[in-house]
Image (cartoon, rainbow, N blue to C red):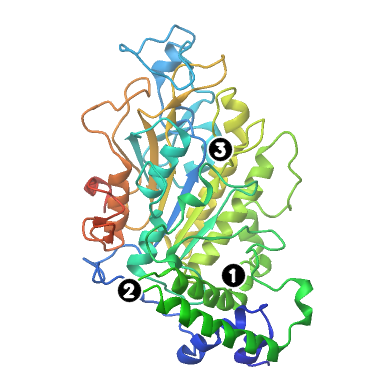
Amino acid sequence: MQPRRSFLWNSGGGLGGIALASLLAKEPISSAEEPLVQNTSAGGLHHPAKAKRVVHFFMSGAASHIDLFDHKPELVKRHGQPSDFGEPVEAFQNGLGPWLKPVWDFKPYGGCGKMLSDTVAPLGDVVDDIAFVHNMVSRSGVHSAATLQQATGFLVPGFPGAGCWVSYALGSINENLPSFVVLPDHRGFGSNGVKNWDSAFLPSQHGGTIIYPGRPDPIADLFPHKAGSFITSKGERQAHELMKEFNREHAAMRSGDSRLEGRIRSYELAAKMQLAAPEALDFSTESSHAMKLYGLDRGAQEWGKEINAEEETFHFGQKCLAARRLLERGVRFVQIWSGNDNGFPRRNWDSHEDVERDHGPLAMGMARGCSAFIQDLKQRGMLEDTLILWTTEFGRMPSSQGGKGRDHNPFVFTNWLCGGGIRGGITYGESDEWGYKPRERNKPTQVYDIHATILHQLGLDHTKLTHRNNGIDRRLTDVHGSVIKELIV
């Protein structure tokens, strides 16, 4: 067998050699079970952790809470009647038509009797493990700002994603793989793109690494281009020596600038990933049971002009299975996206024109994938220390837009959490009878509270996890947030 050092010198189009010095110092590479805490400002864990990894499902475009999870019998009774909110309403696109009942029927599921719509019925198999939060509010009704708030805690670009903060605080479990991985929609990015998972002012190595499961090149530029066949080991070593000299000069003139170090670390990680990532993303070793569970037993169908539930199930299930394999191998934070920001008819959850057309395939694919993922983690004993968050940027209005669509509703929407010490089979917070605003309007739940709760389950105090930037001690929760103790076991 070829020694790893020789393999790295002779492969990677430059990446292998860049990482060699690091590997010589650290070999053998550890796959330690315990976290390698890196953030000195956090000082390690602040209290015992109930979770050590996170999966964040993000429905890009604003999923309709009242058509999926938040049962509103009053809308069924008043369907077609003129909507009356009892106060002036500023809608995003004037979608204040008659009341629109949920597109799908609701039924009770699980021992808890949670009402779910038919299009997310597969979640009924795991609903007793889920905690729903129905009184979420957003500070913006604009996709870009609201998405950033859910992803980073702030309405404007320039702040680290939640996964970046977790990586910064807890470091890596497996040095061969990134601590924060992003699995975008197979069609492309949602609103804001990389700004949702950029490291911003945190060290660069904590930014999200983008992976597209199922593609011939799931990680861009990980292996050398065919045109680089002329590169020799000697020439590569000489190039690295020259690069090291340039890097020393560059660093000497820029004291305190961590960007170069971040780039070097990213190349080192890329070299290590050449060994670890292909195996992590290879489904050939999965059992037929697992492939069927995730909806991957019949192969991919080409998605065309009209999306359908089977194709969405395949693509979403592919990301869910990849996430489980990455978590097993030590990735700390995985973010899974559904919906991209381009194309029409819509390939996301922004259902202004037709909720049934847009939400139907996406919701069924999501529900099958999430249900399979939760069942899989549970049977492997991983659910107890893996925290799952499902979110979207805001909800949709209970009134109709153009007869079959719904406008933006930043005033209330739904999140749900599962695993990692979260109580299952419960509902926290309620929306009003229409699903328009929180029932208790002075006690909404905001993303700061969700982020504070996630960090708490990871053993971190959200008020103490800080990084000084431009004279301010920044944190994921800004100056807000409280741990939602009712959600915790």
**Residue assigned mark 1:** 280
- Quarter of the rendering occupied by the C terminus: bottom left
Position of residue 95 measured from the top left corner of the image (x, y, whole percent)? 48, 17
The relative height of residue 67 versus residue 280 in the rendered view (above or below) is above
Residue drawn at 59 percent across, 70 percent down = 280
**Residue assigned mark 3:** 363
Q: Amino acid at mark 3?
A: Ala
Lower sequence index among marks 2 and 3: 2
Label 3 SS: helix
Spatial distance from mark 3 to mark 1, Cα to Cα? Answer: 27 Å
Question: How packed is label 1: few (under 14 Cα within 10 Å), some, or many (20 or more)?
Answer: some
The relative height of residue 441 versus residue 280 in the rendered view (above or below) is above
**Residue assigned mark 2:** 37
Q: Amino acid at mark 2?
A: Val
Lower sequence index among marks 2 and 1: 2
Position of residue 61 measured from the top left corner of the image (x, y, whole percent)? 52, 36
Residue at the farthest top position: 82
- Quarter of the rendering occupied by the N terminus: bottom right
Decide: marks 2, 3 in contact (CB < 8 A)? Answer: no
The relative height of residue 46 versus residue 419 in the rendered view (above or below) is below
Q: Amino acid at mark 1?
A: Ala
Lower sequence index among marks 3 and 1: 1
Question: How packed is label 2: few (under 14 Cα within 10 Å), some, or many (20 or more)?
Answer: some
